Image (cartoon, rainbow, N blue to C red):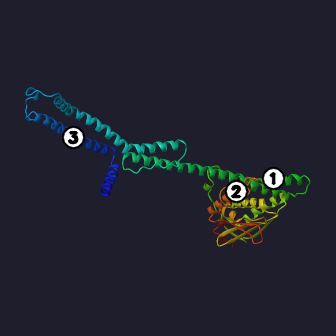
């Protein structure tokens, strides 16, 4: 029995793998053979009953003369003879109808019912925007191919949704980066403008100092203009291009000092800068580095107690910028997760939504560096942003 069951299962799988046209042809062929066999059996059966009647009256069943003309038949014998003739005439029609019904039902049950139910269920889930249902029907026929196509469509919809979500997340990060990056130049411009408005009418600012402040304001306006041009045509933070130019490191240091001077004047927080860049120059993107410094400095000011240190170093063609505060520092979870999108221990407070470190990490990596988070041995958090600069000695 096990061998028979195994062979039947193998035959069923083989039929399942056939196309709908071949399977239907096979079912019809089997039905025709079955009808012929049953019809022949019926004819033989009826002929046997007819032979019993002829034998009863000592007549040859193969005689061509109707038995009614030879003998007087009993009523039961008449019923048997007429019934046999009617069964022989009608059985082929009855068997054909039954075969059609059975064949169509078996074909629907074995080849159509399951994939149709799977497709109907898949369509129902998709209409509810639920793409978790897998449309899988392991068969080599056309309906199996349709189910496979439906499942590919489902996977493509998932990918499309992920792409749209990533685009939205990227756009959200881009908007945050844009808003954050223009805040510092605006703060610098506002600080110098307030100082000029307050002290220039009193004659406390010399012409030389006035010109210097106006140049600083102009440099910040130029930075805003360049940044807005950069952001105008990109749709994602990942689309920002790093455009390195050969510049002296002391220019970068001076730009950072300008930002610090204005921020220090508007905060009761001590900000110190220690530079070990020396008189070197290298290829780097000033705007990218300043954007990272702005973000990290903003975070440090939010969590520090009263002091922030900025350390600038250059070693082996890499610029290292350390920003250290004397706050509570990072927890173990924050060291691992703080640079992930929208993670923050103070999410939603004071405008901090955990996006700054994510932007910094992405920009550092684009510039050939990385972002690392640690706690200082003296207490507080310390963040290191590195940038590949292809540095060259300044002769």
Crowdedness near tag 3: few (<14), some (14–19) or many (≥20) residues, C-alpha within 10 Å:
some
Instruction: Give how far apart the Cα atoms at labels 3 and 1 are.
Output: 101 Å
- Picture coordinates of residue 65, whole percent (x, y): 7, 29
Q: Which residue is mark 1?
A: 190
- Residue in view at x 28 percent, y 43 percent: 25
Q: Could you tell whether 195 is left or right of 166 in the image?
A: right
Image quadrant occupied by the N terminus? bottom left
Location of residue 206 (image quadrant): bottom right
Under circle 2, the secondary element is: loop
Q: Which badge, 3 or 1, is on the more N-terminal residue?
A: 3
The answer to which of 278 and 125 lies nearer the viewer is 125
- Residue in view at x 19 percent, y 34 percent: 88
Under circle 3, the secondary element is: helix
Q: Which badge, 2 or 3, is on the more N-terminal residue?
A: 3
Query: Disc 3 or disc 1, which is closer to the eye?
Result: 3
Q: Which residue is mark 3?
A: 36
Instruction: Give how far apart the Cα atoms at labels 1 and 2 are.
Output: 26 Å
Q: Is residue 110 visible?
A: yes
The answer to whether 350 is drawn above or below residue 80 in the figure is below
Q: Could you tell whether 260 is left or right of 72 in the image?
A: right
Q: Are dots 2 and 3 in contact, CB under 8 Å? A: no
Under circle 1, the secondary element is: helix
Q: Which mark, residue 354?
A: 2
Location of residue 104 (image quadrant): top left
- Residue in view at x 69 percent, y 71 percent: 314
């Amino acid at each position: 029995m096990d061998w028979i069951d195994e062979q039947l299962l193998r035959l069923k799988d083989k039929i399942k793998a056939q196309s709908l046209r071949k399977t239907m042809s096979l079912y019809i062929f089997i039905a025709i053979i079955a009808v012929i066999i049953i019809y022949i059996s019926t004819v033989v059966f009826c002929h046997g009953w007819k032979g019993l009647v002829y034998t009863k009256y000592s007549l040859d069943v193969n005689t061509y003369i109707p038995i009614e003309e030879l003998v007087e038949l009993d009523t039961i014998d008449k019923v048997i003879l007429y019934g046999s003739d009617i069964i022989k005439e009608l059985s082929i029609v009855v068997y054909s109808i039954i075969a059609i019904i059975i064949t169509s039902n078996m074909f629907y049950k074995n080849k159509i019912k399951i994939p149709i139910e799977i497709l109907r269920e898949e369509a129902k889930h998709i209409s509810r925007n639920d793409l978790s249902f897998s449309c899988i029907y392991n068969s080599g026929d056309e309906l199996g191919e349709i189910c496979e196509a439906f499942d590919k469509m489902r996977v493509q919809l998932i990918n499309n949704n992920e792409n749209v979500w990533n685009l939205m997340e990227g756009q959200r990060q881009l908007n945050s980066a844009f808003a954050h990056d223009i805040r510092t130049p605006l703060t610098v411009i506002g600080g110098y403008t307030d100082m000029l408005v307050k002290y220039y009418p009193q004659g406390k600012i010399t012409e030389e100092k006035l010109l210097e402040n106006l140049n600083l304001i102009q440099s910040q306006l130029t930075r805003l203009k360049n940044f807005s041009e950069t952001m105008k045509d990109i749709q994602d933070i990942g689309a920002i291009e790093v455009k390195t130019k050969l510049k002296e490191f002391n220019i970068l240091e001076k730009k950072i000092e300008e930002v610090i001077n204005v921020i220090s004047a508007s905060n009761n927080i001590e900000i110190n800068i220690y530079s070990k860049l020396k008189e070197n120059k290298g290829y780097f993107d000033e705007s990218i580095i300043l954007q990272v410094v702005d973000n990290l400095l903003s975070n440090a000011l939010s969590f520090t107690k009263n002091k922030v240190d900025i350390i600038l170093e250059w070693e082996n063609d890499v610029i290292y910028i350390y920003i250290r505060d004397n706050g509570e520092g990072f927890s173990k979870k924050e060291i691992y997760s703080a640079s992930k999108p929208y993670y923050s221990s103070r999410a939603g407070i004071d405008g901090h939504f955990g996006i700054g470190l994510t932007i910094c990490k992405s920009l550092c990596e684009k510039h050939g560096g990385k972002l690392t988070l640690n706690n200082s041995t003296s207490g507080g958090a310390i963040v290191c942003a590195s940038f590949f600069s292809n540095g060259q000695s300044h002769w």
